[in-house]
Amino acid sequence: MRPRKIIAMVMTFLMMLSLLPSLVFAAAAPEGELGGQLKIKGTAAVGSELSADYEKVTPEGLTDDYVTFSWSRKVGDQLTEVGTEKTYKLVDEDLGNKIELKITGKTEMGITGELKVNTVEIVATPEEAPEEATELREEGQEAAPAEEAPVQEIAAEDTPAEGSQTDENTQPAQDVAEDTQTEEVIDIGADEPTDSSADVMQPADGQDTENSADNSQSEITTDDSVINIGTEGYLEVPENGQAEAANQGASAESPAKQEPVYTAEIVTENTAEDGTAVLDFGTVNAGFTQENANSSMTKNVTVKNTGNSTLNFKEISPEHFMVKDLGSLAAGESVDAWVMPREGTAVGEYSDTITYETEEGVKVSFIAKLTVAEQKQDDTNTDQQPAEKPAAPETTPEVTPEVTPEVTPEVTPEVTPEVTPEVTPEVTPEVTPEVTPEVTPEVTPEVTPEVTPEVTPEVTPEVTPEITPAPSFTTDISEVKFDSKEAGYKEAPAAVTINVSNTGNVKLTGIAVSVSGNEFTVSAPSASELEANANQSVSFTVAPAVGLAAGTYTQTVSIKTDQTDYLNIPVSFTVTEAAAKLTAVGKVSDISLANGVEKSAAGLQLPSTVKITTNKGDMNASVKWDVKGSAYNQNSTEAQKFSVKGTVALPDGVTNPDNLSLVVSVNVTVSRGSIVSDAGNNSITGISSDGNYTTETKITFTAVGAGMDIENPIKGDVRYQPLNWEVLEARSWDGAPYSATFRMGKNGNYTLTVTYNQQQFDGSNWVNTGTQDTKQVNFTVNAAPNQTLTPAADKTDANQKNAVKTGDNTPILPFVIILIVAIVLIAGILVYRNKKK
């Protein structure tokens, strides 16, 4: 085999060995604090499913296993947790509200911190929803970082000069785009190479540092993102300008999970001694119907949800009353429910406890009272009174058959008990019915001469009153009042039957009935004759005519017989004006107000009336607004959008036969006032005084300016824009992101100082006011435990660096040496071949 081929094989083997680190080193697991941009995917409409999108959340490589999820319904400033999965399906209760998503890092997985984001307001249908479900500005988040690019190495002497800083009064009105800003990884305070004349930076005044001896030889160290060869003071600049493992600062504490509260109350016109609500319907006549019932037959109770969660009421059906079923009732919402007695309720007194019950176990009750009385009828007839019947003679039936043949005509019917003593004593006991057969032949000759002259004058006066006729009759109803009807009625009230009874001692004939006008009709009597003392009656009916105009009609029904005068019965019927029928309830226009108005109907400029449409034209109806139940926060300076619900009260004479909803709603927008940010809210995140930092640690910090998250600024808004930072040397920012990454080359105590410019929005641009604020963080840097020592001293080298830990402890130095040897051999072969040619 030729030497060249052998050399080529050796070189190939060496090159393959040099590439092993990229194949065997484990990929870095995500670790650090949550940052970047959290979004929500999906359509902001009821019935749609939302999901967490943390594609641009740092650290990179984040999966579902590293965080927990919390979905909350946001009503005003109140949050109610509704889900803990990665996805959440929107329900009816979300309509008109926003949904907040919070992800929290699992500390056991090496992830800390949390991020929050809100959706836009949830709408009813996907067609109404905007294309982007995420709210324009995510709460508590900085702008999304770009992906990190390889770090460049710049010598320490290339540090910008003081004159390169941007003048504080000429700051740009708009922040520089994130993808055009670079961020430096700076090694500060390391010993310079022996051939450099640059001075070494020292710690803050009065603080000690450990100085390493000059390193006379080139030193080679490697890093996943930095390679330093023979230099100690340098800058590392990622192309995308993003800080590595940027600390976004402690997120605001998430509100405590609110436990659901299910309570309700019921209000009526009266209350019992024990506090129970009472509805008293009073007394009604038996046989009442809803059609002929007056307004007192329908009453209302008010049911209010006094908890913080929706109540779902079950259907109920009381025995003696009809009630309105409530359905669902949102937190703080109230509803008026009608109650009325059931038709056909029997005579009696009722005091029923009616209970509304919800699926959540809430019960609210009230007592409904009702008395059903028998319908009284007046059977007296004041026009005629029946004549007394004459008393019949006591002995007439017994004596008549025996005496008739022998006594004169005058005596035959009138033999009374008074006559008996004047007959001879022998005759008296034989007059009884038992002796009749034997007395007849013996009495005849003796009675004739003796009785005739004495009996005649005494009996005659008693016969006359017994034959006097006394005709009379009565009715079972003395007055008829028909239930009212509304003008335009097509069917008359049910006819009333009147019964006539004979109360006299003679037969009644020629019974006739008539009415005094055309507004009522009567039927012919069921018979024209009625026997005296008969257990029967003659009947007829009376009813109002159809199609009468509005008004009250009173007439007389007259009853007459051949033997009596007229008996009059008054009848009456009322036709009311036709009521206006509700056909539509108008909408209320949106309202826009300045911030801070009073939380009242007047303060929010809510209209006192709303237009309604009826079959008789448009009208104005009063409306009662539930301002207390709205989400408006009078003390907030932020812009607010919320709705206020109201209940329409129909004017007198307007009915709602189709049960149209009387609930109206108005959308109110309250613009925010000027935001004057407090300098006390300026902060530095990502670095702390108790942090554990070594000379190998890349420290990433972020300057957070108060008010820098103001969206859509208005005139008068004030914010603080980060201007520059300093650790031994000063560096400036031209725009967002206001982050930087640095490494300290020596151990010691240091101070990071950040300066902020106060700016005010003049209506078009942010303008510097000339006021500045500074924030500082003191921190300590220790020597790395595995730092390479210089030959001249046993002190640690402040500039020593190791590769980023990836979880793989394979030594990389042998592979680097092999790579260098391979490069030298290749170069030697090339030189050898050139010389040979």
Image (cartoon, rainbow, N blue to C red):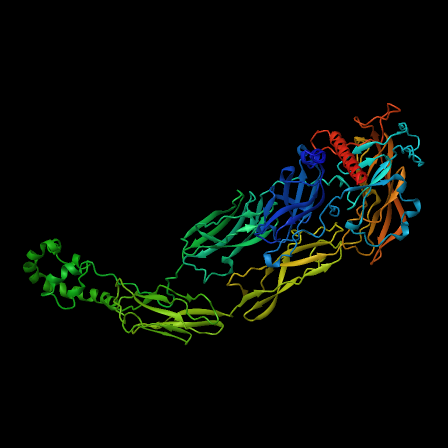
Left or right, residue 447 beside residue 560: left
Camera-side residue of 354 and 747: 747
Q: Is residue 583 left or right of residue 783?
A: left
Q: In this rendered view, identify the residue nearer to me: 214 or 299.
A: 214
Quick check: 714 left or right of 356?
right
Image height check: is 411 above or below 628? below
Residue depicted at 77% across the width and 55% down the height: 712
Provide residue 353's location: percent of width, then percent of height.
49, 46
In this picture, residue 730 sits left or right of residue 658? right
Residue visible at 67% across and 43% down?
102
Give the image location of residue 150, x and y in percent: 76, 42
Camera-nearest residue between 121 and 322: 121
**Image location (x, y in percent) of residue 822:** 75, 34
Image quadrant where residue 437 sits: bottom left
Residue drawn at the location 70% of the way across and 60% of the way down: 591
Farthest residue in the top direction?
Answer: 794
Q: Is residue 803 visible?
A: no
Q: Quadrant of residue 255?
A: top right
User: Where residue 487 sits in the image (x, y, percent)?
Assistant: 48, 71
**Image quarter hosting the C terminus:** top right
Q: Residue furthest front?
A: 837
Looking at the image, which is closer to me, 187 or 480?
187
| Number of disc labels | 0
